Amino acid sequence: MNKYIIIAALIIVILGSGIVYRSFLLPEEMTPVVTGNVREITMVAPKNQWTFDPEVIEVEKGDKVILTLINSDDYDHGIAIDAFGIAQRMPANRTITVEFIATQAGEFPFFCSVPCGEGIINGEKRSHFDMIGTLRVKDIANKTP
Ligand SMILES: [Cu+2]
């Protein structure tokens, strides 16, 4: 038999088994989940507050998240969500957007990634280290968490 026919047949078998695996045999948990939903969320760093508003954001697993981050301060902040590989500077008095797919469910911290000082608000000291929050990714399909 012609060796090119054998090679072609082999390629067809290899590609075919890949397609069969992806279509029928891939474990449910490894299937990439994309809901097709887009969550547009706006988060503000209010002037001299050393906080993110809101401090808790909630999305569903598989959502595409578009975060609009408004820095109202005259100094830089940053946004870091380690679980999704996000680390972006938020320049003073600027708005940035950050996009990611919430591929895993759970509660993930986000925080300011740029040292931004401290101050007294209503008699209480606040600082860079208070700029933390929680990203809650709910797994609707599996009802957790
Ligand atoms: Cu900050």
Image (cartoon, grey):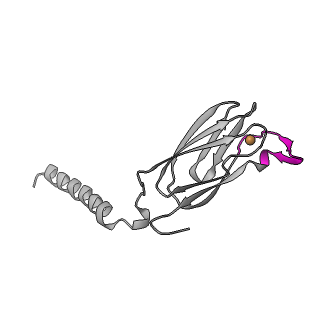
Which quarter of the frame holds ligand 1?
Answer: top right
Magenta stretch holds residue 25: no
| Residue at the image position 39 percent from the left and 67 percent from the top | 27
| Residue at the image position 49 percent from the left and 56 percent from the top | 103
Which quarter of the picture shows residue 115?
top right
Magenta stretch holds residue 126: yes
Q: Residue furthest left?
A: 1
33 sits to left or right of 84: left
Indicate the position of residue 30 as horizontal and vertical percent values: 43, 63
Indicate the position of residue 129 as horizontal and vertical percent values: 78, 48
Indicate the position of residue 48 as horizontal and vertical percent values: 79, 38
Image height check: is 23 above or below 66? Answer: below
Indicate the position of residue 36 as horizontal and vertical percent values: 41, 51
| Residue at the image position 16 percent from the left and 49 percent from the top | 4
Span colored in magenta: 112-129
Report the number of discs: 0
Image height check: is 141 above or below 48? Answer: below
